[in-house]
Amino acid sequence: MQYYIAVFRARSETITFAGLLRSYCPAQVINTPRTINVSCGISVKFSASNIQFAKEILSRRRFDTFVGLFQI
């Protein structure tokens, strides 16, 4: 199964995004992989089948510290 992680530079925005995404689909806060060293240390992991929910949240809400979505 393929997953995406949403990476932010601020822990507060990571937690906020996770809460919003969980209202649509399962999501998990995880430690950010070391290969992505531009974050606060935690990211949000979710199934690739739910990418549209994530993109919708990101387009509706301004996250100043959003780095990007990474497929894992």
Image (cartoon, helix red, strand yellow):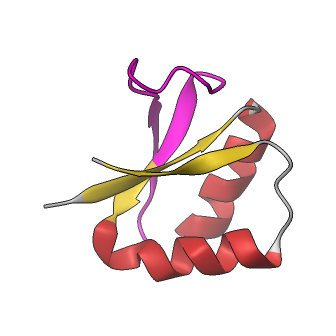
Residue 38 screen position, x and y as percent = 61, 25
Q: Judge whether 20 appears above or below 49 on screen.
A: above
Q: Judge whether 19 appears above or below 8 on screen.
A: below
Compared across the picture, whether 71 is left or right of 39 comes to: left
Q: Judge whether 42 appears above or below 7 on screen.
A: above
Q: Residue at x 13, y 61 (%)?
A: 1
- Please say whether residue 23 is visible from this viewpoint: no
Magenta stretch, main secondary structure class: loop
How many labels sit on residues? 0
Q: Residue at x 68, y 56 (%)?
A: 17
Compared across the picture, whether 69 is left or right of 34 comes to: right
Residue 15 screen position, x and y as percent = 68, 44
Compared across the picture, whether 48 is left or right of 66 comes to: left
19 or 67, which is in the foreground? 67
Q: Residue at x 77, y 45 (%)?
A: 13
Q: Judge whether 55 appears above or below 67 on screen.
A: below
Compared across the picture, whether 60 is left or right of 3 comes to: right
Does residue 30 show up magenta in the picture?
A: yes
Q: Which residues are magenta?
A: 25-44
Does residue 41 show up magenta in the picture?
A: yes
In which image quadrant can residue 59 be found? bottom right
Residue 65 screen position, x and y as percent = 79, 42
Q: Residue at x 31, y 65 (%)?
A: 47
- Please say whether residue 40 is visible from this viewpoint: yes
Residue 32 screen position, x and y as percent = 46, 28
